[in-house]
Each structure stands twice: as structure tokens, then as C-alpha cells.
């Protein structure tokens, strides 16, 4: 089975067949707030992620609060359709505020993201568990 072939029993229809790796960047109550996290250029981070997405063919979107505010900034790296077919699952990255972390997230997404590429080892140290309600929602 190739990386682009879904796992047995998995059927992708419509746009889901072509879905790229997607970075979901929290910009809720704590993430991206310069009053709570001075010294971090939050606008630059989103601009850098979007520039990388345009260059490498993945997607970036921002969202309201994802929940683990004590681990801000939070980025969820969602697998592409091919990555999900290869067993990749959304990966939550916490404390994503410095340039090194931003570049490692970009590197991983450009390489294919969950299911298709191994994350940088130092980025793995920043993986966090999603809030309980996010895990329950994802099973529906």
C-alpha cells in the first residue's frame, strides 16, 4: 500500500481525498496575545507559517481557543489525506513560541506531516495531549 492509498476500510470522498497537511494555529484568549506573552512576535509566526505553506503546499488556518491555555502557543498539525491513510493523526504542539519551534513545524509539514514524515526530535518534546473534550469530539 502506498502512502497515498488509504488504510483498508478507509474511504475518502470529495475534497478529503486531496486534503493537504494543515496547521491549525490557536489565536484564542492566550495564544497569540502579546500582553500574556511579550517578546514573541505572534503576527510574524502566522506570516511565516503561511509563507511556508504557500511554498510547500500545505495549509494554515487560525482558530479561536483550542483549550490548553497553560501551554500556549498551541499548533495542531493535522495529517494530509495521504498521511491519515498511512496512520497519521492530529498532533498537538504546545509552547510553540520561538523561531526554532516555528521552523521545525514548517519543516515537518513540508516533509508531509503526521503519517508521512517523522517530526524533528526536538519538536517531539513539545507534543501535548489535546484537551479531553477535543479527544471526545474527534471520535464522533
Image: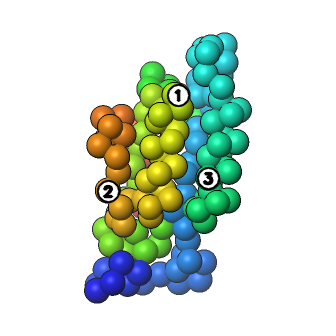
The circle drawn on residue 118 is 2
Disc 3 residue crowd, few under 14, some 14–19, many 20+, Cα 10 Å: many
Q: Determine the residue positioned at 64% across, 60% down.
A: 55
Q: How many marks?
A: 3
- Residue 29, picture quadrant: top right
In the picture of the structure, the residue carrying the numbered disc 1 is 97
Residue 76, horizontal then vertical, whole percent = 48, 46
The circle drawn on residue 52 is 3
Residue 136, horizontal then vertical, whole percent = 38, 50
Task: Relative to 117, say whether 120 is above or below.
Answer: above
Q: What kind of element bears circle 3? A: helix
Task: Relative to 76, say whether 39 is above or below.
Answer: above
Q: Closest to the observer: 29 or 55?
A: 55
Q: Determine the residue positioned at 43% across, 74% down.
A: 82
Q: Determine the residue positioned at 37% across, 84% down.
A: 5
- Residue 28, picture quadrant: top right
Residue 130, horizontal then vertical, whole percent = 39, 41
N-term-proximal mark, 2 vs 3: 3
Q: Determine the residue positioned at 55% across, 58% down.
A: 22
Judge from the rendering whether residue 5 lies leftward or rightward of residue 48; answer left or right: left
Disc 2 residue crowd, few under 14, some 14–19, many 20+, Cα 10 Å: few
Image marks 1 and 2: residues in contact by CB distance under 8 Å: no
Amino acid at each position: 500500500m502506498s502512502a497515498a492509498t488509504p488504510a483498508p476500510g478507509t474511504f475518502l470522498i470529495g475534497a478529503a481525498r486531496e486534503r493537504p497537511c494543515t496547521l491549525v494555529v490557536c489565536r484564542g484568549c492566550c495564544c497569540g496575545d502579546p500582553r500574556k506573552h511579550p517578546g514573541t512576535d505572534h503576527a510574524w509566526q502566522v506570516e511565516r507559517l503561511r509563507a511556508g505553506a504557500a511554498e510547500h503546499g500545505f495549509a494554515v488556518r487560525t482558530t479561536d481557543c483550542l483549550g490548553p491555555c497553560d501551554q500556549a502557543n498551541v499548533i495542531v498539525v493535522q495529517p494530509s489525506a495521504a498521511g491519515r491513510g498511512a496512520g497519521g493523526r492530529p498532533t498537538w504542539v504546545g509552547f510553540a513560541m520561538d523561531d526554532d519551534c516555528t521552523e521545525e513545524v514548517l519543516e515537518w509539514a513540508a516533509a508531509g506531516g503526521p503519517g508521512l514524515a517523522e517530526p524533528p526530535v526536538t519538536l517531539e518534546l513539545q507534543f501535548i495531549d489535546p484537551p479531553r473534550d477535543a479527544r471526545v469530539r474527534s471520535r464522533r
